[in-house]
Amino acid sequence: MNRLSYFLLLAAILPSWLTAQSPTDPQESPEETPALTHFAAATVHPLATAAAIAAFEKGGNAIDAAVAAAVTLGVVDGHNSGIGGGCFILIRTADGTVTAIDGREMAPAAATRDMFLRDGKADTSLSQTGALASGVPGSLAAWEHALKNHGKLTLADLLLPAADLAEAGSPIDEVFARKLAAASSNLAKFPESAAVFLKSDGTPFTEGETVAQKDLAASYRAIAEHGSDWFYGGPFAESVDTWMKANGGIMTRDDLRNYVVKERQPLITHYRGYEIVGFPPPSSGGVHVAQMLNILENFDLKKMEPLPRTHLLAETMKLAFADRAFWLGDPDFAPVPRGLIDADYGASLAEKIDLSKATTVPGHGSPPDAETDVFDDFDRKHTQHLCTADAEGNWVSMTSTINTGFGSKVVVPGTGILLNNEMDDFSAQPGVPNAFKLVGAEANAIEPGKRPLSSMSPTLVLAEGRVIMAVGAAGGPTIITQTLQAIVNHLDLDQEVENAIGAPRIHHQWSPDVLRVEKAMAPQIIEGLKSLGHDVAPTTGLGVSQAITFDPKTVSFHPAHDPRAPGSAEGN
């Protein structure tokens, strides 16, 4: 069976497969995943997982499989991520080397601090939709860098099957359809976007209908033939330059030509004897997952009852997000204190927590040596997550995004490539919330060439020098708290990976001072949180996580996808 036939078969069986495989109640215990000994992959879409498995079977390793899944997600899950966005790739290779590849978008050279201010006030519509909203995409550069340095297959090997799928089309799932309906009015503002994602009468495609992306297929094939130069210095860069000039944008061909992928020093901390490997700034996730674990290490979570433990998690999140709002930014431009991940600083924050009631966090803390000991030596310096692993000892935890659903809503004419709206992740104006209601300060102000602060949190957990868990999430700022809770559930509460990511979650980001709680959580805990003084906001779901764990005793992988959304976890 050739590649096209293989994917068409998968597309044909997708709707019934999803019905059979995706539990809808996070409290339900998913069927136990069989032990896997050769390789494993977990992604948010069955066709992306299939692409990862196909890469393994072609002779590739975990790095090849991760990129195969990522380029496929750009086709079937393009509202979340794709070639027009950015990513963070955390890799641990078979020889023990840990690499953090920063493919985050960069602000164009003409970007200015006040570019989104109108009459002295931030106009967030400009940073979220249209020609000014996009940063220079970095995903392709990061994928290519990862493959050249750590993979076995070529970029063309992985792009061509995804191109076949884009041309043939695939049925859209419930999540894609829902996001498309929500974004349809903005997509309709741009003829090229409407031509791809809307029907001839202007209405959005619905669940089960097929969307073919022929221009995107042609772009994938052009990159497969000519390499990333086609994107960063050739026809795509010219197309972007032309469209931006005609529509009031500032991104130019030179911005694309000057994009730089960076290898950064992975963030390594410890928690209860485990080694936690996170992504450094401009990711805020690695810093604050580590910071929150440092706080929690001062409490015996396993012995705590569910209500006080959940309250403790909420109070911990508030403290970390208050620090995030003030201190975090691109370390190449702003001094981000290393003291945020200092264990003693974590202990001092733990002392501020009152287990008997919710408390107000007035503002950021003061980590030690905040002005002198900073993250300045790192290579001086709506989103999706995937994980892959292989028997050779290679692990990948990768988070990719174009930011909010369908990014800037702009498809570059003739290319099928949807651009991100990552400029909204900068602080357009100190104290003004972005699309995720996050506020920022001077450290995350807009500057030319700067990378906006991100919540993406690809993480690896090691025990005795061996990776035992890869985890990450999608969902804006909830990425950080999802990752934290998955780690706590697995390491502290001994939950198997399926339950560790499927258990009901909470989220608090300091501002606004609201505790979001999934409705699936036990009613007595929700009422108990209210009685402790939390302003509880029930919600259906908080993001989507993916994870793989490894059991050294049985020498087996256990991949898991989040039951809150369609996805798949497979291996062999």
Image (spheres, rainbow, N blue to C red):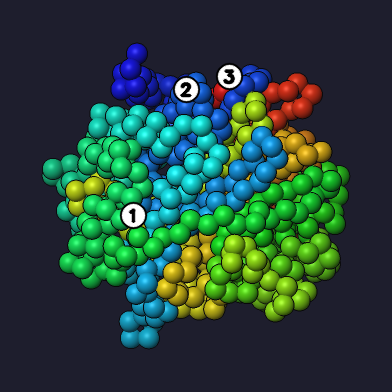
Q: Quadrant location of residue 569?
A: top right
Could you tell me the amino acid type at mark 1?
Tyr
Front-most of residues 481 and 338: 338
Above-or-below relation of 458 to 60 = below
Considering only order in the chain, which callout, 3 or 2, is on the residue closer to the N terminus? 2
The numbered disc on residue 572 is 3
Residue 483 in view of the camera: no
Comparing 273 with 527, the one in front is 273
The residue located at (65%, 28%) in the rendering is: 392
Q: CA distance from mark 2 to mark 3?
A: 13 Å
**Residue displayed at 30% across by 38% down:** 225
Residue at 24%, 63% in the rendered image = 241
Seen in the image, is 548 located left or right of residue 132? Answer: right
The answer to whether residue 138 of the structure is visible from this angle is yes
- Say few, some or many: other residues with alpha carbon within 10 Å of mark 1 (under 14 / 14 to 19 / 20 or more): many
What residue is pinned by disc 1?
232
Q: Tag 1 or tag 2, which sits nearer the N-term? A: 2
